[in-house]
Amino acid sequence: MIAREREQRELNDAFRSERSQFIAVYGRRRIGKTFLVKETFEGRFSFRHTGLANADKKQQIAVFKKSLKKAGMRSSTPIADWYTAFDRLEELVDAMPVGRKVIFLDEVPWMDTGRCEFVSALEHFWNGWADYRKDVLLIICGSATSWMIDKVIRDKGGLHNRVTRNIFLEPFTLGECEKYVKSRGWQMSRMEIAETYMAIGGVPYYWTLLERGYSVAQNFDLLFFNSRARLKDEFSLLYRSLFRRTEGHVRIIQTLGRKKVGMTGEELSLIGRIPRNGHFRKMLAELEQCGFIRKYTGFGSKRSAAVYQLIDNFTLFYFKFLDGEKNLDENFWKTHISSPGVYNWRGLAFERVCLQHIAQIKRKLGIEGVSTKVYAWSGATTGGKGVQIDLLIDRADNVVNVCEMKFTNGAYEISAEEDMKLQTRVEAFANTAGEGRTIHLTMVTSRGLVPNAYSRNVQSEIMLSDLFNS
């Protein structure tokens, strides 16, 4: 299995525990939750069941009964509610031989079909039966992250603090995607892997859709622009799988998609025409928990000035090239690969990939053990001209790395004009940062810097290859 060693180790530790364990596995659609559990426990399941999408209580219970029969249930007594369904599961497990009992309930949020008392029955199953034993390993899984967090992980009722371990599956990093590519025997350069990552992120399922032997341009047309594009309907399916009422969440990300650096809550509410209430704050928290947006503060700003920025690669690619059927050309990427629009997208997307690999940047800087805070900053020069820095790493050793990110096909050459812009930017920030801090200009590039008189003004250099390090 690629890149899930820590999560797999945690599952196996729970299996070896001397007490019953209740594990919640969650994360966005197509991230590999079911695959992780199946690969870890294949051949060791005592009972497994998957909820039905868009089904009512009667249908959900009917398929649950079928799963019970497959696992060995002999009773033919009708099952009319979830309490009875879990009673039958208890009877089934009680009749099993001595040993660890692995119970896997997949897509649990689908099973909770409004006023069906599923959550109450699950509470009773765990609190009144499984937790009293020492041999049960209950694993529940679901893509509807908001449901998993609200109804289970942070439940205020009977499941409060009952989950013994929760595992949130994050997207692959660039390095993990490279491992996957090599495991499939594909030949892809790091530049090609990075460009693919810019569009589909580190979602494992999306990577399985790539065709071996195809160029990046051919694969993009296959995934996004072909008449039977494999990810044609993914945008709507993605958000519907995560949130039961998606209109507000989609409105938020559509609004954030208009501004690269993000918006404050007040701006977002005003521009998106979204009431700034408790539900608004809850939706922002859910989108942040799922990794679609990031919340940050500008350097020197108060907590109330938090900025929300859309950083999901797939969503931003969709808005840029697909939303509203912008491009109907089935060979769009092959024919526009050198266009200004695609070139500009690469530059912005690379900045986002850098923000998703802060740990690798810190490792290259040799500051893994140093306490840091990550900021963005906007201000003005002494002449009043506005300047923006998208990534600042403020270190406890009183150094601030001012990071500039550039994606080019070859080594990046700093011209006299560009050097002046960089120095003006650093100077403007230094005036804000105050005394006592050392400012290091840090260049993050795809293929390094061309050595010249201006490259000497750069204190730290990081290349794309460094972002692939574990």
Image (spheres, rainbow, N blue to C red):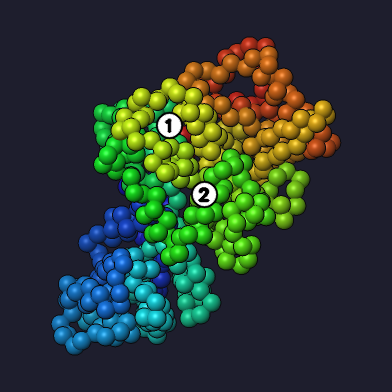
Q: Residue at x 61, y 34 (%)?
A: 366
SS for dot 1: helix
Residue 283 shown left or right of residue 55 in the figure:
right
Report the residue marked by disc 1.
195
Closest to the observer, 55 or 132: 55
Closest to the observer, 2 or 421: 421
Q: Is residue 58 visible?
A: yes
Q: Quadrant of residue 412?
A: top right
Q: Quadrant of residue 147?
A: bottom left
> How many dots with numbers?
2
Q: Residue at x 54, y 33 (%)?
A: 348
Task: Tell me if residue 391 comes above or below residue 285 in the rendering.
Answer: above
- Of pointers 1 and 2, the one earlier in the residue sequence: 1
Residue 221 shown left or right of residue 422 in the figure:
left
Q: Amino acid at mark 2?
A: Gln
Which dot marks residue 254? 2
Residue 422 shown left or right of residue 406 in the figure:
right
